[in-house]
Image (cartoon, rainbow, N blue to C red):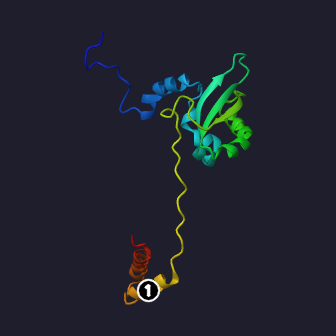
Amino acid sequence: MKQPGSYPKRGRGFARAATLVQSRVRTASEGRGFAETRLLTHWAEIVGTDTAKTAQPVNVTYGKGGMGATLTLLTTGSMAPMLEMQKEQIREKVNACYGYRAISRVRITQTAPTGFADGRVAFTPAPAKPSAPDPAVRAKAAAVSKDVASDDLRIALEALATNVLSKHKS
């Protein structure tokens, strides 16, 4: 039995955070069928940032015959048809990560397979593009800052005045 405060030495100095949690991450990922944890930790690098924003790997299931596994991806309903067309490319990229043809099928699901609390993808809407301010507002902002001698300060004040004047009153 270990005495309180007596822990095995880990070497000199600090240990990297990744090495401290590596065994726990491996255990959790293997419980979902991921033999290669890189698939979870480097998902965006493997399939690309556009695909990674819209889909998340949920689990890998192996068939009874052992002839390839099925990778299940979670996505929203609107992105499912786009991912359906990219399934072959995703499969090839994931197999390149494994180093052999581990994945034979890619299945796309639009809901979490074990319930809504587990496995959901947190999607964020695309940022709204700012619209060009009204020319009358720009002219009014330029008139407010016209007497400022410093060019940098005048540009900053004009931008501030444009933002203030273009806000909608609630």
Per the image, the residue denoted by label 1 is 140
Give the quarter of the image for residue 92: top right
Mark 1 surroundings within 10 Å by alpha-carbon count, few (fewer than 14), some (14 through 19), many (20 or more): some
- Residue 44 vs 170, above or below: the answer is above
Q: Amino acid at mark 1?
A: Lys
**Residue 58, percent from left and from top:** 58, 32
| Residue found at the very far left of the displayed protein | 4
Q: Is residue 139 visible?
A: yes
Give the quarter of the image for residue 109: top right
Q: Is residue 97 left or right of residue 161?
A: right
Residue at horizontal 69 percent and vertical 33 percent from the top: 106
- Residue 70 vs 138, above or below: the answer is above
Give the quarter of the image for residue 36: top right
User: In which quadrant will I find the N terminus?
Assistant: top left
Q: Secondary structure at mark 1?
A: helix
**Residue 7, percent from left and from top:** 32, 20
User: In which quadrant will I find the C terminus?
Assistant: bottom left
Query: Between 44 and 133, which is closer to the camera in this rendering?
Result: 133
Residue at horizontal 54 percent and vertical 75 percent from the top: 132
Q: Is residue 79 left or right of residue 126?
A: right
- Residue 37 vs 84, above or below: the answer is above
Q: Is residue 5 left or right of residue 137?
A: left
Residue at horizontal 62 percent and vertical 27 percent from the top: 60
